[in-house]
Every structure is written in structure tokens, then in C-alpha cells.
Image (cartoon, rainbow, N blue to C red):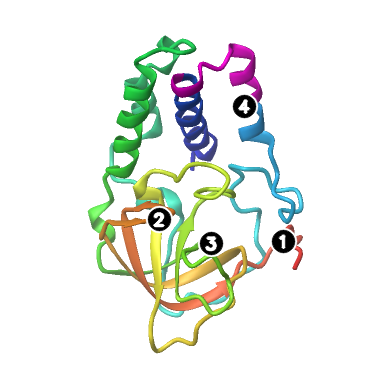
Amino acid sequence: MATSKFLLVCGALMLTGAASQNAVSAGARESLAESIVTAQASSSGGLRIGDPLPPSKAGNASDGYEEILWPALLPEGWTVEGIMEKLNLNDLGDNDPKAREMLQKVREMWDNAPVNPKLDNRRVRIPGFVVPLDGQREKTREFLLVPYFGACIHAPAPPANQVIHAVIDKSVKSANLSPAMWISGTIRTVRSDTRMGVSGYEMTVDKVEPYQLDSNPFPI
């Protein structure tokens, strides 16, 4: 998955918005760009914003769920490169009056990113980073799953086709979620607009499992 390219466009969203509203200098924009890419949350243990999941230990059996990764959520023919070609961000200068219009256009493109219809109503298992919708990890029943560290919290939300709105099934005990999890359940192509971002998928979660890493960057 082209995580760095997703983050690049997310960073561009922030930079063009800042240029439009605050008339920041080129130097300030460069500094902000660097902070977007290199900033680390205090609890990340070395993960930087935009980092995908580190390698994992051998996982549990899928129990009848098809194991997928994030590229499977993208529809055929939809690429980040194609989106970037349409943006022409290099044509925008500091304090460009078109920047705010571009910012809105990009956000709309992100929020309406098409999903993969082949995944509708499939039983799948997928790993990702957890973004609690109630602000807590303990005993939560609803959260977003995203492909890279910091999404929706330290950086803008990914395209909707890279966000899963997860709802833990009533038959499953509420979970104390780790920062990174495997989730298993039935995924549907249902769009939701949450306070943390727009999701293109919804999953009724039957099982949640911590993402077991070769080394743990998530100190408790």
C-alpha cells in the first residue's frame, strides 16, 4: 500500500489550508511539512505519523475469515497517483486564493473515494490502527480502523475507501482495544460520516485480537 503517498496528499491538504488562511511563508510551510512527516506521539515508541503496521508474529487461524490487507479495499483502477495528477498542487503558491477552493475539492474527493464492491457482505479479517470514536479504548464498542499510524488524530483522515467503521457485535463482550488490532467480521460497503472522519466501509465485528509484533512499539 502506498501509505507515504496517502500521507503526502494529507499533508498537502493541511499545507494548502494553512497557506490560504494564514498566508504562511514557504519556510513555514516546509517546516510544517517536516513536522507532519516526522512528528511522533509520546506513546508511539518510535512509530512516526504515516507509518504502516510493523511486521507481525504468526497470527491466529482465520477461522473461516478471508484475510485481507488494505489494498484490497481499493476499487480496480483507483490510485493515489491518479488523484495527485488531478490536484496540481505545485501550481499553488503561498496565499494563493485558489488554495481554499482546492482544499475543499480534495476533501470532497477523499470523502467520496469509491469502494470495492466485491467486498460487500464478505467475512474478512484485517489488521489496522484503532481510532476510538468515544475517546476511550476501554470497553468501547465502536471505532475506526485505519491503515497507518496517526490517521484521524495527528493527520487528516485517509480516503474513505481506507477507513473501516467497526461496530463490535452485541454477542461479543466489549473489548479493551490495543492501538493496533486484527478485526474479523462481515464487511459492507456502507458509508458513514463520523466525527473522526468519513468511512467507506462498515464492519460488524465478531472478534478482535491484538496485533502481535516482533517488537512492541506500544508500551502500556
> Is 65 or 206 nearer to us in this picture?
206
**Amino acid type at mark 2:** Arg
**Image coordinates for residue 209, horizontal then vertical, percent:** 56, 74
Find disc 2 in the rendering and name its residue.
195
- The magenta span reads 20-33
Give the alpha-carbon distance from disc 3 to disc 4, as whole Å.
Answer: 25 Å
In the rendered view, tell whether residue 91 sits above or below residue 128. Answer: above
Closest to the camera, between mark 3 and mark 4, is: 4
Mark 3 or 1 closer to N-term?
3
Label 3 element class: strand
Cα distance in 3D space between marks 4 and 2: 24 Å
- Which residue shows up at 50% across the image and 51% down it? 147
**Disc 1, SS:** loop
Closer mark to the observer between disc 1 and disc 4: 4
For marks 1 and 4 on the same chain, the one whose residue lies earlier in the sequence: 4
Q: Where residue 130 is drawn, which disc sits there? A: 3
- Please, what secondary structure does the residue beneath circle 2 have? loop
Which residue type does callout 3 highlight? Val
- Is residue 78 among what the camera can see? no
First along the sequence among labels 4 and 2? 4
Return the disc, 2 or 3, that comes first in the chain's sequence.
Answer: 3
Find out whether the residues at labels 2 and 1 contact each other: C-beta distance under 8 Å.
Answer: no
Mark 1 lies on residue: 218
Residue drawn at x 47%, y 60% is: 145
Residue under label 4: 32
